[in-house]
DNA sequence: AACTCGGGGCA
DNA sequence: TGCCCAGAGTT
């Protein structure tokens, strides 16, 4: 098992820097129930939370329980969510997951990772968003941005996102999970980009092993 | 491991 | 106007 190679006292320093540089909380998924959060998170794949919030809010004016979605024709649901990407797949996932909830989980969202992962359209990231945000469980959501940025900052030295997930869950104080998740995403898009990262304008480059290595050449 | 879905963001 | 993607399923 690989261990994070940042000292724990450095974590607080790093988080303080993020909090200072991103005074507004990161864009986050809105929801009024664990079921709504599950649906919003399924919708959020490869899509910004801002777009998803708009569609989800509109959707849940009309429907709000698994029963409401399980009976929908796929085409009908597609028309309501077609302003976001991958909407045909997502409509299919939402209807299937709603049916599964009714048939196998008494209409409730399961609180175990193993069960969540059985649902249609629910992978590692989506399961962790629901576990952490709706059920207060130990699960740090790791998407591509979180994985890249936390790797560069040496919050995790793992080569596999599954391991990064475990390491961040242990390393990051829980009260920062939600904010840090979105800070890392925002940072990954604006500054710490996959290609041509803008290290010159990065507020935490002085703490960044990736940058140090870059300067050394 | 590579491919597919897709509208929006951004150069 | 073209390139890339705030994932997950399928082959």
Image: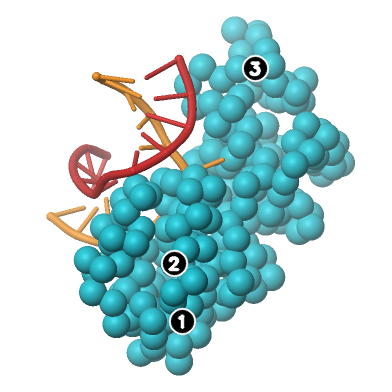
Chain colours: A cyan, B red, C orange
Q: Position of residue A188 (x, y in %)?
A: 58, 32
Q: Position of residue A101 (x, y in %)?
A: 41, 83
Secondary structure of residue under mark 1: loop
Q: Quadrant of the C terminus of chain A?
A: top right
- Which picture quadrant has residue A122? bottom left
In the picture shown, does residue A137 fall above or below A146?
below
- Which picture quadrant has residue A182? top right
Identify the residue at horizontal 51%, vertical 17% (top origin): A196
Residue A79 appearing in the image: yes
Q: Do labels 2 and 3 touch, CB within 8 Å? A: no
List the residue tagged with mark 3. Answer: A199
In the picture shown, does residue A23 fall above or below A142?
above
At label 2, counting other C-alpha atoms closer than 10 Å, the crowd grade (few under 14, some 14-19, many 20 or more) is some
Q: Earlier in the sequence, mark 2 or mark 3?
A: 2
Viewed as shown, does residue A61 lie left or right of A24? left
Q: Position of residue A104 (x, y in %)?
A: 39, 88
Q: Nearer the viewer, residue A4 or A211?
A: A211
Secondary structure of residue under mark 2: helix
Judge depth for marks 2 and 3 and give the one in front: 2
Gap in Å between the C-alphas at discs 2 and 1?
Answer: 11 Å
List the residue tagged with mark 1. Answer: A65
Residue A89 appearing in the image: no
Query: How many badges with numbers are in the image?
Result: 3
Secondary structure of residue under mark 3: helix
Label 1: chain letter: A
Identify the residue at horizontal 44%, vertical 46% (top origin): A47
Label 3: chain letter: A
At label 1, counting other C-alpha atoms closer than 10 Å, the crowd grade (few under 14, some 14-19, many 20 or more) is some
Gap in Å between the C-alphas at discs 3 and 1?
Answer: 46 Å
Q: Nearer the viewer, residue A95 or A133?
A: A95
């Amino acid at each position: 098992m690989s261990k994070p190679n940042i000292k724990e006292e450095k974590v607080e320093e790093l988080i303080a820097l993020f909090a200072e540089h991103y005074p507004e909380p990161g864009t986050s998924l809105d929801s009024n129930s664990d079921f709504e959060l599950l649906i919003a998170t399924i919708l959020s794949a490869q899509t910004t939370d801002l777009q998803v919030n708009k569609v989800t809010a509109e959707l849940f004016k009309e429907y709000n329980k698994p029963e409401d979605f399980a009976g929908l024709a796929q085409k009908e649901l597609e028309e309501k969510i077609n302003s976001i990407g991958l909407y045909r797949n997502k409509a299919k996932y939402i209807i299937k997951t709603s049916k599964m909830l009714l048939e196998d989980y008494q209409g409730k969202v399961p609180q175990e990772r193993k069960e969540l992962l059985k649902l249609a359209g629910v992978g590692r990231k989506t399961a962790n968003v629901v576990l952490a945000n709706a059920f207060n469980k130990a699960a740090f959501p790791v998407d591509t941005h979180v994985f890249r940025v936390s790797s560069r900052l040496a919050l995790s030295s793992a080569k596999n996102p599954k391991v990064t997930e475990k390491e961040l869950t242990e390393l990051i104080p829980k009260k920062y999970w939600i904010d840090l998740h979105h800070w890392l995403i925002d940072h990954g898009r604006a500054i710490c980009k996959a290609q041509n990262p803008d290290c010159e304008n990065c507020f935490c480059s002085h703490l960044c092993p990736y940058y140090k290595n870059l300067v050394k050449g």
